[in-house]
Amino acid sequence: RTVYVNGEYLPETEAKVSIFDRGFLMADAVYEVTSVIGGKLIDFAGHTARLERSLSELEMASPVTMDELLAIHRELIVKNNIDEGGVYLQITRGAGSDRDFVWPDPEEVPGGIVLFTFAKPLLNSKTMDEGIKVISVEDLRWGRRDIKTTQLLYPSFAKMQAKRAGCSDAWLVEDGFVTEGYANNAYIVKDGTIITRQLSSDILHGITRAAILRFAEEAQIKVEERPFTIAEAQEADEAFVTSATGFSQPVIEIDGEMIADGTPGPIAKRLREIYVEEML
Ligand code: PDD
């Protein structure tokens, strides 16, 4: 694979970053994952808008302009011949001369940037046909989940607990209410209404979430943005999750309790069809 590191396209085995890079030492970095279908980026404008917001909330500068970023994404997709998959992008605060809790002056220390592609089937997934099982775990992440940082140890810990329980996902719960999935936004459907937590610093403002809610409205499906509990989810008619690389995926079981009859629900299926049709 060819990857992009700090201004250069290199084979992945030759790409290097400093051991003093603050992304590596302190998770002082933000990221985006954009999916690719038929060699085309899906909702790139949404991802760059969120990236700019993450950067500005952390007073971090991008080493490249958003136009350059698009050009790098496209170049990597071509170089690596990506038909279906995605592009991972990470911007760090760069490498100080040592380990320091104080941010370096951006005039002196340029930010670090890394991009790589991955090939992965997105359109035909087994989990879409069969649905996924989730467990709930306490949400112990920091309080600014609206900023897409690379502090992913807790989500990774939650995913491991899910895996050990024979499930593929974890839903995070704070003060009795679901915030979101470990790497996706969480939804339930009751009596034809989609229920999902409202935007705040408690959750990541999913790019797929924004699109799915827009399509739901266009299809005249009611949407209620409010928190819900695991008990309410277990009694719902449907549950699903959304993310850039998963689109919308039905959830069929939560903490061992089947949702309705334990098969993917019609609204989740329909939204996925609309999403794929509209976004490609
Ligand atoms: N995860 N919530 C969290 C905590 C996430 O990490 C993600 C994305 C989402 C969905 O956001 P979007 O629809 O913009 O992808 C919600 C990415 C895909 C990841 O970490 O791999």
Image (spheres, helix red, strand yellow):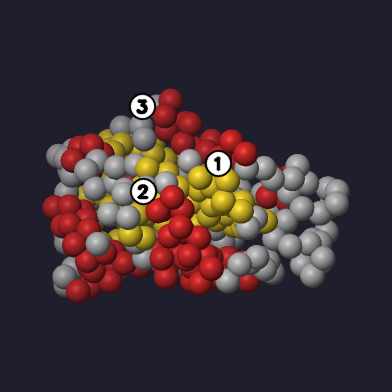
Q: Position of residue 118 (x, y in %)?
A: 42, 44
Q: Residue at x 36, y 60 (%)?
A: 41
Query: What's the residue type where badge 1 is placed?
Result: Pro
Residue 160 seen by the camera:
yes
Query: Helix, strand, or loop for circle 3?
Result: loop
Q: Residue at x 74, y 45 (%)?
A: 18
Q: Secondary structure at mark 2?
A: loop
Name the residue type under label 2: Ile
Residue at the image point whose x is 61% and y is 67% from the top: 64
Is residue 140 something one can see in this rendering?
A: no
Pointer 3: residues within 10 angstroms few (<14), some, or many (20+)? Answer: few
Q: State how far apart marks 2 and 1 are (Cα).
A: 16 Å
Q: Report whether 63 appears left or right of 252.
A: right
> Disc 2 vs disc 3: which is toward the camera?
2
Above or below residue 59? Residue 129 is above
Q: Secondary structure at mark 1?
A: strand
| Classed neighbour count for the residue bearing mark 2: other residues with Cα under 10 Å, few (<14), some (14–19), many (≥20) | many
From the top left corner, tell me how far across and down residue 214 is, in percent. 28, 71
Is the C terminus in the top left, top right, bottom left or bottom right quadrant? bottom left
* 273 sits left or right of 143 in the view: left
Disc 1: which residue: 11
Mark 2 or mark 1, earlier in chain: 1
